[in-house]
Image: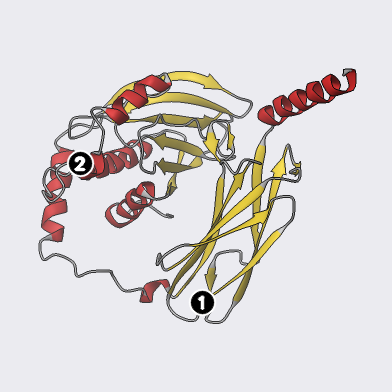
């Protein structure tokens, strides 16, 4: 009986330690840039880590692969082993592979309250990838009018409140006036070392109703912006109430009406966020990176296409 209790007790301790552990997925590629030639083979490797060491047996890597965005190929792989795959292209387009870490019950593992998802890919002949559809005749007129509406609202920082700091960065809760019903709202991180200037990274959210995150990168200023201009750092109930109430089904709000569709002002908040970042005194005056996936990817493409100051997306 005593042995049984000891085993149960040790099992509980192990579960608590794993819950507090830092999980990660290290992904490497034999291509430094992801830009390839026809027929070039690129090997991608993934290793799942727990506190910097290989994860215990029983964990799973979920692997998803896209080619030109047409469908998804899914497979699973034991996470305690190194996974390898080869990406290759012979026609203009892109291939992308992502990795998720699943626990022993096949649920996604979170680290610091965020799902662990890491990916990489390749692209061939980017300038030869054709648009999915023909550009509307009044495309420029439509967006020039939207930009004029944005310009009619002065660039004004409504709030910049320091909320925390770590060894390398300090974090600010920032709100910036914008056209439409909501401001730009996000967490800005600045390196504590003010002896030089830095590139800026604008990070944009996928679908959902969540707070911004306190993101920091070595040698960079980062602005993590939530998609809705809502408050940051609130209790979970605040976001759940919005998700199930005022913002329930938001992707379809005014769908079919290009002047009132929900994403119009979301996109204008992206442009205002970029304007704001160009005023940050610690910016190096040249490098502006925009990053996002899914809905955040749409915002990223919009930013790169609409704002010539964006240097990398």
Residue 50's tag is none
| Residue under the point 48% across and 18% down | 163
Residue 34 image position (x, y, % from top left): 54, 66
Residue 29 image position (x, y, % from top left): 63, 62
Mark 1, other Cα within 10 Å: few <14 / some 14–19 / many ≥20: many
| Residue under the point 12% across and 42% down | 260
Residue corresponding to mark 2: 262
Point out the residue furthest to the right here: 3
In this view of the protein, can residue 231 be seen by the observer? no
Q: Quadrant of the N terminus?
A: top right
Image position of 299 (left or right of 182): right
| Residue under the point 29% across and 27% down | 242
Residue corresponding to mark 1: 89
In this view of the protein, can residue 90 be seen by the observer? yes
- Out of 304 and 212, give the one closest to the viewer: 212
| Residue under the point 49% across and 37% down | 221
Q: Quadrant of the C terminus?
A: bottom left
- Out of 193 and 39, give the one closest to the viewer: 39
């Amino acid at each position: 009986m005593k042995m049984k209790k000891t085993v149960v007790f040790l099992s509980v301790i192990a579960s608590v330690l794993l819950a507090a552990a830092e999980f990660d997925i290290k992904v490497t590629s034999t291509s430094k840039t992801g830009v390839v030639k026809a027929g070039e083979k690129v090997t991608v490797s993934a290793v799942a880590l727990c506190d910097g060491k290989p994860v215990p047996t029983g964990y799973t890597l979920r692997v998803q692969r896209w080619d030109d965005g047409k469908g998804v190929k899914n497979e699973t792989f034991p996470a305690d082993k190194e996974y390898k795959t080869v990406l290759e292209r012979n026609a203009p387009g892109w291939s992308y592979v992502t990795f998720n870490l699943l626990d022993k019950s096949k649920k996604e593992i979170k680290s610091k309250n965020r799902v662990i998802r890491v990916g990489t890919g390749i692209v061939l002949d980017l300038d030869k990838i054709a648009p999915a559809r023909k550009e509307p005749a009044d495309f420029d007129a439509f967006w020039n009018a939207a930009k004029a509406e944005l310009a009619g609202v002065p660039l004004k920082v409504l709030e910049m409140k320091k909320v925390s700091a770590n060894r390398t960065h300090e974090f600010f809760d920032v709100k910036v006036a914008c056209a439409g019903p909501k401001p730009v709202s996000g967490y800005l991180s600045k390196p504590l070392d003010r002896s030089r200037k830095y590139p800026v990274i604008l990070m944009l959210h996928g679908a959902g109703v969540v707070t911004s995150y306190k993101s920091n990168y070595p040698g960079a200023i980062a602005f993590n912006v939530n998609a809705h201009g809502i408050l940051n750092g609130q209790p979970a109930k605040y976001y759940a109430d919005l998700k199930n109430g005022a913002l329930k089904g938001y992707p379809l709000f005014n769908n079919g009406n290009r002047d009132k569709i929900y994403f119009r002002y979301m996109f204008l908040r992206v442009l205002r966020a970029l304007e704001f970042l160009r005023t940050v005194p610690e910016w190096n005056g040249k490098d502006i990176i925009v990053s996002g996936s899914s809905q955040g990817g749409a915002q990223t493409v919009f930013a790169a296409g609409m704002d010539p100051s964006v240097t990398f997306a």
